[in-house]
Image (cartoon, rainbow, N blue to C red):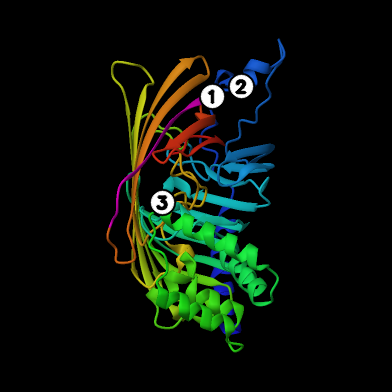
Amino acid sequence: MIFKMKRLTFLLTIFLLSNVLLMAQTGETEKPFNYNPDNYDLMTLFAKKGATAVIDTNWSKTHWSIFPAIAVNPAIGTGYGFGITAGKYLGNPETTRLSAFSSTPIYTSKGQLFVPLRLTVYTKDENYFLNGTYIWRHFPLGTYGLGTNAPEINGDMLDSKTFTFWQTVNKKIGNGIFVGIGYALDYYYDIHDTRAEIITDYIGGVRNGDYSREELIDFLQKASDFYKENNIEPPSIKDKLAFAKDMKDPNMSNSDIQKKHLPTAYETYYKEKFEEIPDDVKNGKEIASSLMLNFIIDKRDNQLNPYKGIYFNAYSRLSYEWMGSTTNYQFIQYDYRQYWEMPWLKKNILGVWATGAFTFGDPVYTGLPAIASDPFLRSGRGWTAGRLKGMDMMYTEIEYRIPVYNLLGMVGFVNGSQFSDMDHNFEKLKLGYGFGFRMKLNKESRSNFALDFGWNEDGYAGFYMQLNETF
């Protein structure tokens, strides 16, 4: 295990140093940055009359900012924290996009802690593009089993801590076209299966005589009613007798009885997928250590809020035990986005987002595709994170964006999700939909404040507050 961690630490160190050294370089000042004070809508709106803006026009200088942050999402409740950003051009802005660093640590009303860091580096003339995502989080999330048909009654909460390190180095092979290679690590540890712990405690209480006969009869009646109401086949007489026998066996622990007779979705996955449960899983952790192969086309006119253009990213993750992974498996994902400005209405934008993920081999459970499983929980508005999960995923979202007045706008959206079961069979399409409001923060960067309201076909509703567009 020590040797495994040394290999991981060495890889992380090399990638981090390469990014920091590039950000520390001084760009060539071939052309000053063109500042227009009218670009700053929100700032201009609240500025004192006659105030004079003082802006550093040296585009090769690193500019830092820090600000309070708030986020609202059904998966996190309300999150509070602060944001810190830095931006710098490493070449002429006409031929080189802005290199940027950002981090927004958040603590949520549900006791979750989320510490992300993003680093995007474009070298001069964009000959190379380095992209990194680094996250530490204590982030319990719900899980219900595999496929879009997984019932609500399977609901469980996996409490875990996660360290994520994704880094790619990409070479430009054409205008806005890059190919690259990288390394990805998702390290899940201190995994606690909440439902398993609750059931195990209850079994222990029954065996210790903590419940009266009347309480047990009442519980069994409620269980019987539950099976009928949800059209679930109750346990057979044979299963009941086996359960009763194990309850009286002093050699069977409470946990052994729970896993044998009342396994959770998490336990069922490893029980059915593997002949023997991996040692890492037995010790409450999962590791996905992967080589990444990357292909990017980015023809958008703006990265934060495009009016037109196309973005396509396809990458593969090759995870092997010799690299430190818990299991051997492969993961392929594509991400396609396109935007059109309606010719009959200025700045009315139609955006389409389609993404898919497919696994091969024996992936770890927490690394499987899931709704809102992207690092910043942007997909699946109308659904709570983790409600839909599968061996494979296909997801599509359409959004229509319209300006309303001055710096205000609105959006309407609909999304569709399909996830596969254990045998990679895709199940029923699930829909989400909603609308939202926008406030423009900066005309030049097109950054904005977003407030969205979403529903899904099962009736769940939630609202989402964030900076910038979902896609």
Viewer-nearest residue: 390 or 113 = 390
Q: Are marks 1 and 2 in contact (CB under 8 Å)?
A: yes
- The furthest residue to the front: 214
Q: Which residues are magenta?
A: 426-439
Q: Earlier in the sequence, mark 1 or mark 3?
A: 3
Q: Secondary structure at mark 1?
A: strand
Dividing the picture into quadrants, the one containing residue 64 is top right
- Residue that label 1 marks: 440
- Residue that label 2 marks: 42
Point 66% across, 49% down: residue: 110
- Residue that label 3 marks: 127
- The furthest residue to the top: 49
Query: Which quadrant of the figure contains the N terminus?
Result: bottom right
Pinpoint residue 311: horizontal percent, then vertical percent: 35, 43
Cα–Cα gap, marks 1 and 3: 32 Å
Q: Give the residue type that dot 2 points to.
A: Leu
